[in-house]
Image (cartoon, rainbow, N blue to C red):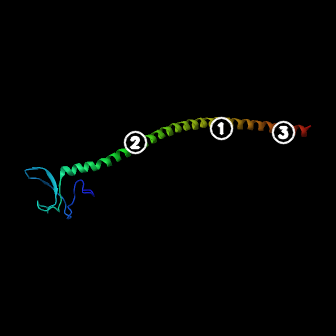
């Protein structure tokens, strides 16, 4: 039971646990109520509360909390939608980056092949220069 005595009672003011009982009176036959084990018809200081009234109070007290939870749920749903949208955007950007990297990788392989060709041409030119220098030396020293 809440601070204001609302809802389902757990204990009597005397400290005893509340028990669920069934009314046997003509006015309320079979109606359930919470009572202290030490309560009787003459003692007004102990717990007595009808269960249907307790349940109504519990439900009334839960309504604002349920509304708060619904609001929080809606806020979380909106946040989740934003996150999902951001994830889709990031996935598209990732695919774009992967395509750019793939293109750069192809260009790099092409440049590497071109570089290999240039190295081979350079070796060939080097060999030609060495031959020309040797021929010039032979021409200069022999004649």
Residue 67 appears at what percent x and percent y? 33, 45
Q: Secondary structure at mark 2?
A: helix
Q: CA distance from mark 1 to mark 3?
A: 31 Å
Residue 31: numbered disc: none
Task: Locate residue 37: give its quadrant.
Answer: bottom left
The residue located at (13%, 50%) in the rendering is 31
Q: CA distance from mark 3 to mark 2?
A: 81 Å
Which residue, given by chain and number where applicable, does mark 2 sit on?
Answer: 77
Which residue is at a point 42% across and 41% down the rendered structure image?
78
User: Of the residues tagged 1 and 3, which is closer to the observer?
Assistant: 1
Given residues 138 and 13, the one toward you in this image is 13
Categorize mark 2 by other alpha carbons within 10 Å: few (<14), some (14-19), many (20+). few
Q: Secondary structure at mark 3?
A: helix
Q: Residue furthest right?
A: 143
The CA span between labels 2 and 1 is 51 Å
Q: Earlier in the sequence, mark 1 or mark 3?
A: 1
Quarter of the image containing the C terminus?
A: top right
Q: Is residue 28 left or right of residue 127?
A: left
At 69% across and 35% down in the image, what residue appears? 117
Quadrant housing residue 1 = bottom left
Residue positioned 64% across, 34% down in the render: 110
- Which disc is residue 112 wearing? 1
Tag 1, which secondary structure? helix
| Mark earlier in primary sequence (3, 2) | 2
Q: Is residue 99 left or right of residue 28?
A: right
Badge 1 local density, few (<14 within 10 Å), some, or many (20+)? Answer: few
Q: Which residue is mark 3?
A: 133
């Amino acid at each position: 039971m809440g601070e204001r005595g609302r809802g389902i009672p757990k204990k009597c003011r005397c400290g005893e646990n509340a028990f669920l009982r069934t009314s046997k009176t003509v006015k309320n036959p079979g109606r359930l109520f919470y009572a202290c084990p030490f309560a009787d018809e003459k003692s007004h200081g102990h717990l007595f509360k009808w269960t249907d009234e307790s349940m109504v109070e519990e439900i009334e007290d839960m309504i604002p909390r349920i509304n708060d939870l619904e609001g929080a749920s809606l806020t979380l749903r909106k946040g989740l939608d934003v996150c999902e949208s951001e994830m889709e955007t990031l996935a598209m950007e990732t695919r774009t980056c992967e395509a750019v990297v793939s293109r750069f990788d192809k260009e790099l392989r092409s440049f590497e092949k071109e570089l290999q060709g240039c190295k081979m041409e350079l070796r060939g030119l080097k060999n030609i220069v060495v031959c020309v220098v040797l021929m010039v030396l032979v021409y200069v020293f022999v004649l």
